[in-house]
Image: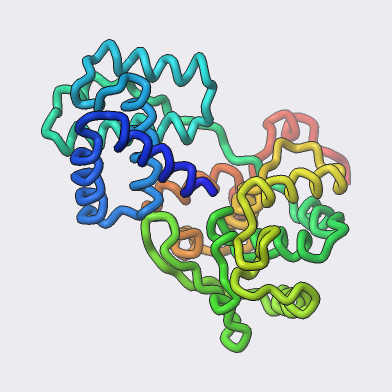
């Protein structure tokens, strides 16, 4: 659905803004030659199309005041998600670099990094969550996301043929960074997946939407997580991605090395994975308060 909306906005800009067609064709070529994914092209294209429609002019013809005013408009007016603002920022930077407008890149405002540590569920909270779902499909969905550390888009794109019950593997295709990877399928979860498939008889996607030939929507998946959290009585500020954070943190606590975890998560850079070291309670690095050393408990 998001891809369809992006394509419509891009088509609108092609019809209404002079120069957008040739600019977008060049953008498409650069994205493909750079090995970036189609989703990156659509994200950049949608954001560049919106600013082009706003000014009725392509961004390379806009001055610094117009660009910064538009970015401020995004932050203060429409209140978009952080990811949408970042796509706009990086899309403009990519566009200016593509047209050798290095001076324009420097003038873009700096995005502050979000230094918040991820929210993580305890192992007991995970058990409570998975037991709380009233519908088999919902329980299996959440269990699968946690058991393999999947992103929302990855689980929604899974097809029946991507699950190999004989080899106990899950094939993740062309995900973030435009790469494939294989993940281990938990033998215990394989039993639950077989029961789910027998009960729901999916035809193409492992988890379909209202139409049996369509995949489950992002909003539908988010709703499942929110409703199950309520049923479980978990009050943490948890989202669907919290299950991926919990997967990574728990594996570190069970003794997995960071580089293996990086490969399982599909991270391109080790620095992205290292954030979980700040959350995990690792053996040999137990943290405590010095106050406890002043008044040690009597055994």
- Where residue 86 appears, as percent x and y from the top left, is 41, 32
| Residue at position x 68%, y 73% in the image | 202
| Residue 94 located left or right of residue 152 | left
| Residue at position x 70%, y 62% in the image | 141
Residue sitting at the far bottom: 166
Nearer-the-camera pick, 270 or 13: 13
| Residue 80 located left or right of residue 67 | right
- Where residue 150 appears, as percent x and y from the top left, is 57, 59
| Count of marks overlaid on the render | 0
| Residue at position x 80%, y 45% in the image | 227
- Is 217 located above or below residue 167 in the figure? above
Nearer-the-camera pick, 282 or 161: 161
Residue sitting at the far front: 15
- Is 245 located above or below residue 195 in the figure? above
Q: Quadrant of residue 137?
A: bottom right
- Is 142 located above or below residue 165 in the figure? above
Nearer-the-camera pick, 280 or 287: 280
Q: Quadrant of residue 65?
A: top left
- Where residue 110 appears, as percent x and y from the top left, is 34, 23
Residue sitting at the far left: 100
Q: How is the image coloured?
A: rainbow
Q: Quadrant of residue 233?
A: top right
- Where residue 36 appears, as percent x and y from the top left, is 30, 53
| Residue at position x 14%, y 28% in the image | 102
């Amino acid at each position: 659905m998001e891809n369809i909306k992006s394509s419509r906005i891009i088509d609108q800009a092609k019809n209404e803004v002079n120069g957008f067609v040739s600019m977008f064709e060049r953008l498409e070529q650069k994205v493909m030659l750079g090995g970036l994914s189609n989703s990156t092209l659509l994200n950049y294209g949608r954001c560049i199309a919106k600013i082009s429609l706003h000014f009725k002019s392509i961004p390379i013809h806009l001055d610094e005041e117009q660009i910064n005013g538009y970015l401020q408009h995004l932050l203060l007016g429409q209140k978009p998600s952080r990811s949408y603002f970042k796509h706009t920022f990086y899309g403009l930077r990519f566009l200016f670099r593509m047209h050798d407008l290095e001076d324009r890149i420097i003038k873009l405002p700096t995005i502050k990094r979000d230094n918040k540590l991820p929210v993580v569920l305890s192992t007991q909270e995970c058990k409570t969550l998975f037991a709380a779902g009233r519908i088999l499909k919902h329980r299996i969905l959440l269990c699968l996301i946690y058991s393999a550390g999947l992103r929302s888009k990855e689980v929604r794109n899974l097809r029946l043929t991507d699950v190999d019950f004989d080899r106990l593997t899950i094939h993740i295709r062309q995900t973030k960074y435009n790469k494939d990877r294989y993940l281990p399928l938990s033998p215990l979860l394989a039993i639950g997946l077989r029961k789910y498939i027998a009960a729901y008889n999916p035809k193409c996607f492992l988890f379909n939407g209202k139409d049996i030939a369509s995949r489950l929507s992002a909003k539908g998946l988010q709703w499942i997580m929110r409703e199950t959290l309520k049923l479980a009585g978990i009050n943490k500020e948890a989202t669907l991605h919290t299950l991926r954070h919990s997967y990574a943190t728990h594996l570190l606590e069970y003794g997995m090395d960071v580089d293996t975890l990086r490969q399982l998560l599909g991270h391109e850079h080790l620095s992205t994975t290292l954030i979980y070291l700040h959350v995990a309670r690792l053996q040999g690095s137990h943290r405590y308060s010095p106050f406890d050393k002043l008044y040690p408990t009597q055994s």
